[in-house]
Amino acid sequence: MNNIFIRIHRLFLIFGINPLQTIRAFKGIPIYYKNRKLLKQQEKNASKKFPFATPYPCLSDRFENAGEATGHYFHQDLLVARRIYQNNPSLHIDIGSRIDGFVAHVASFRNIEIIDVRSLTYKIPNVTFQKSDLMEELDNKLKERADSLSCLHALEHFGLGRYGDPVNYNGYLLGLDNLYKILKKDGKFYFSVPIGPQRIEFDAHRVFSINYLLELFDNKYHIDCFSYVDDKGNFHENQSIQDSGKNDNFGCNYGCGIFEMTKL
């Protein structure tokens, strides 16, 4: 039953409708008018006036938490940014990760070069941007360029056309091969993708089984550290990848596997 509700909720979100927020908004209407009336009454005795302008109702905010300190992006962005700060590489390049999350974290304390198939129209301090499709043949200038590389929650989209990239069933393999070429020998690779029973949820993303990921990394990388975010958004840091839990993806249906690796 829960899966049915999740699918219905997801369908509404596709069309820009958030059912939970709508319910909260209706719940907030009487509180809004009650508070507005109270504030107008208090205005009469105020020493300094703030004129009332066009109403801007925020009806659901009072029912929400102070913030969302959970989920894939929150945990992976903080973890990997912290590790880059600790390792202090000569050059860090990021492929396709969130600008308003991970990239911003790193740019707050060092320079970072980013590559994305999409355009970036903003100039951001400490950020150098290059538009490129990592499913195409790699520019020779990028080969073995970086001693530190990240690709967080991005490779699962390669070749599905979601972000304007060409449809290519093996796009993730082409991308992974180019990531390997960009990184210098003994360089650090920070990588994350959704983990669970292997599948494509078109055209959102792929979900990878951990055993398949280990096949892809074999003879190319040494896994220094593995962490994951479970289906409830809880973070599990520095877990044994050889644990039997990998066979059922640590119980995840749609979790996030976060790898720190060294290129062999």
Image: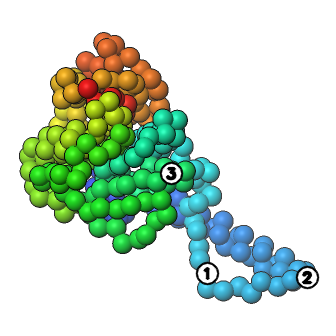
Residue 164: quarter of image: bottom left
Residues under numbered marks 3 and 1 in contact, where contact means CB atoms less than 8 Å apart:
no
Q: Position of residue 96 (x, y in %)?
A: 31, 52
Observer-nearest residue: 21 or 187? 187
Which residue corresponds to mark 1? Answer: 55
Q: Position of residue 126 (x, y in %)?
A: 48, 59
Observer-nearest residue: 91 or 137? 91
Q: Position of residue 190 (x, y in %)?
A: 36, 37
Q: Secondary structure at mark 3?
A: loop
Instruction: Report whether residue 138 is seen.
Output: yes
The mark nearer the N terminus, 3 or 1, is: 1
Which residue corresponds to mark 3? Answer: 110
Observer-nearest residue: 232 or 151? 151
- Quadrant assignment for the C terminus: top left
Which residue corresponds to mark 2? Answer: 47
Left or right relative to 211: residue 244: right
Q: Secondary structure at mark 1?
A: loop
Left or right relative to 124: residue 13: left
